[in-house]
Image (cartoon, helix red, strand yellow):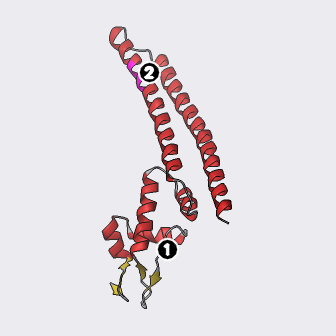
Amino acid sequence: MIIAGKKYWKVGELAKLTGVTVRTLRYYDQIGLYSPSGYSNSGYRLYNESDLSRLQQILALKELGLSLDEVKSILADDNYNPFEIVSLQIDRLREHIRVQQKLLKELQNVSNLMEMEEPLAVEDFTKLLSMMKKSHEKFFTERRSSMEHHFDKLGDFLDKHSNEST
């Protein structure tokens, strides 16, 4: 749809164009993350090229693993630092890989023991599973703590740049 020389898409058209569901676009509007530029006389949401660009930013940040609240706060500040966000995600991914490598090593050790000796007793296998569960719980506790620390740093960075621009 073209209005006053500008290209606009209705919500269904934008959904087809981007691969994002209509339901998701409406939800983003509902939570204030992504709203249309305007509405038609019939009440249809209308999105323009700048809206499309913002949606692409949202999708890119979500692809990095950020929550919708994180995406919303980042996009609310024009001075956000994409490098900081990418660095944070690299740290997250490295930690995830480290934990997965540790788990793989533990499972390979058990597999080797099972091949070389008698199969593990049920008690030993249960003990291993318990150890793996504790390892995962520790990882997620550490990860949450680490994420909170990184988000505090990111929040401080955003606050600093927000204060500089005012």
The residue at which mark 2 appears reads as: 106
Residue 36: x %, y % from top left = 46, 76
Question: Would you say 35 lies left or right of 17 here?
Answer: right
Q: Which residues are magenta?
A: 104-108
The picture places residue 79, in percent across and down from the top left corner, at: 56, 60
Up the image or down, 139 lies above or below 124; here it is: below
Residue 98 visible from this viewpoint: yes
95 to 70, vertically: above or below:
above
Q: Nearer the viewer, mark 2 or mark 1?
A: 1
Asked whether residue 24 is in view, the answer is: no
Q: Earlier in the sequence, mark 2 or mark 1?
A: 1
**9 in magenta:** no
How far is disc 2 from disc 1 in space, using C-alphas? 48 Å
Q: Is residue 40 left or right of residue 73?
A: left
Give the quarter of the figure containing the C terminus. bottom right
x then y, percent, for residue 11: 38, 76
Q: Amino acid at mark 1?
A: Ser
Q: Which numbered circle lies on residue 35?
A: 1
- Quarter residue 43 falls in: bottom left
Dot 2 falls on a residue whose secondary structure is: helix
